[in-house]
Each structure stands twice: as structure tokens, then as C-alpha cells.
Amino acid sequence: MEYFYRVVDDRNDRLLIDKMIEYYAGDPKRIQHFLKVYTFSKIIGEAEELPDEELFILKTAAIVHDIGIKVSEEKYGSSSVKYQEMEGPAVAEPMLRECGYDEEVIDRVLFLIANHHTYGNIKGMDYQILVEADFLVNLFEDGSSQKAVEHARTHIFRTQTGIRYLEQMFCPA
């Protein structure tokens, strides 16, 4: 059963990734970003031994977490996190339905999209790991200062794997 679940899981990932690459056609920066967040989410989730169902939700959310950027830029001329979180769920929902995701998965993924830049009340390992994975990628892509890395280490990161990756990437001994 677990093998079957993983095969279905991998197919879902590939289908949704294909749809997101099509959605962001001509924007390699956005494609590269979500693929990196997806990879870190998957690796951290597996290392932290998330249950299969929660890992499935995490990986799905990682693929579509920034889907609201495109419409935010079109609608408001801004990719502000406020607009991303506000606009993302409405864009993601039909794509998730078209790919055949279950209602409970869709509900949680939409919640994660709508809150992935809200750090004050993180509930759930899927949420925590998505935030950490996004931070690992954003700290690099934004060329963040050591002070920003230290702030993230102290205030954002909670998983052993995420902390280890942050320290190995940005604070080598």
C-alpha cells in the first residue's frame, strides 16, 4: 500500500509541477523558486518523518505556494506578500481540482498558501516546514545579510533538519 501511495504521490507532484511550469511559462525565476522550495520541503519533511498524508500536503503546497504572485503583479503592480496570500488561493483552487486533489487536501493547501508569509502562529509541521523551505530559498535568492539569517534562525526555524541546513548553508564553521 505504501509503495502504491508513493507512486500516486509522485504522479500528482509531476502533474502539478507541469501545470505550474506552464502557468509560469517565460518566467524561469518563479519556476526555479517553487522547484527549490518543493525540494527543500520534501527533503525536510522526509527527514522529520512526517506522516505520508502530511508530507503529501506539504509537497503540494510547496509547488503552488507563490501562485498568487502573478495575479498580484497584474492586479496591483506588486508582489507584496499581503497580495500573494490574498490572491493565491483563488488561483490555486481550480488547478488543484483539475488535478484531482481531495477536498481536505485542497482546503489545507489553500490555507498554507494564504498564510505562508504569516509567522506569528504557525500550527502544523507542514506549515512550519513550508516556511523554513521558503526561507532557505529566499535568504539565498535575496542575498540576505548574516543578520537576517541569524534572525530567521532565532525566530523562524524549529525543525532540526531546517536548522542544520540553514547553518550549513549560511553559517559554516
Image (cartoon, rainbow, N blue to C red):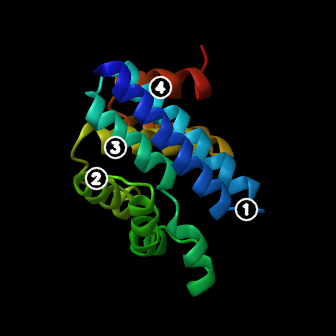
| Three-letter code for the amino acid on which mark 1 is drawn | Ala
For marks 3 and 1, the one nearer the N-term is 1
Label 2 and label 1: CA atoms lie apart by: 27 Å
Judged from the image, the secondary structure of the residue bearing numbered disc 1 is loop
Say whether residue 3 is left or right of residue 138: left
For marks 2 and 1, the one nearer the N-term is 1
Label 3 and label 4: CA atoms lie apart by: 14 Å
The residue that appears at 28% across and 21% down in the rendered structure is: 1
Please report contact status of discs 4 and 1: CB closer than 8 Å, yes or no.
no
Q: Which residue lies under the disc numbered 3?
A: 57
| Three-letter code for the amino acid on which mark 4 is drawn | Ile
For marks 3 and 4, the one nearer the N-term is 4
Label 4 and label 2: CA atoms lie apart by: 23 Å
Closer to the camera, 45 or 145?
Answer: 45
Residue 45 seen: yes
Q: Which residue lies under the disc numbered 4?
A: 43
Judged from the image, the secondary structure of the residue bearing numbered disc 3 is helix
Q: Which mark is residue 25?
A: 1
Closer to the camera, 130 or 172?
Answer: 130
The quadrant of the picture occupied by the C terminus is top right
Please report contact status of discs 2 and 1: CB closer than 8 Å, yes or no.
no
Label 2 and label 3: CA atoms lie apart by: 10 Å
Q: Position of residue 155 (x, y in %)?
A: 35, 42
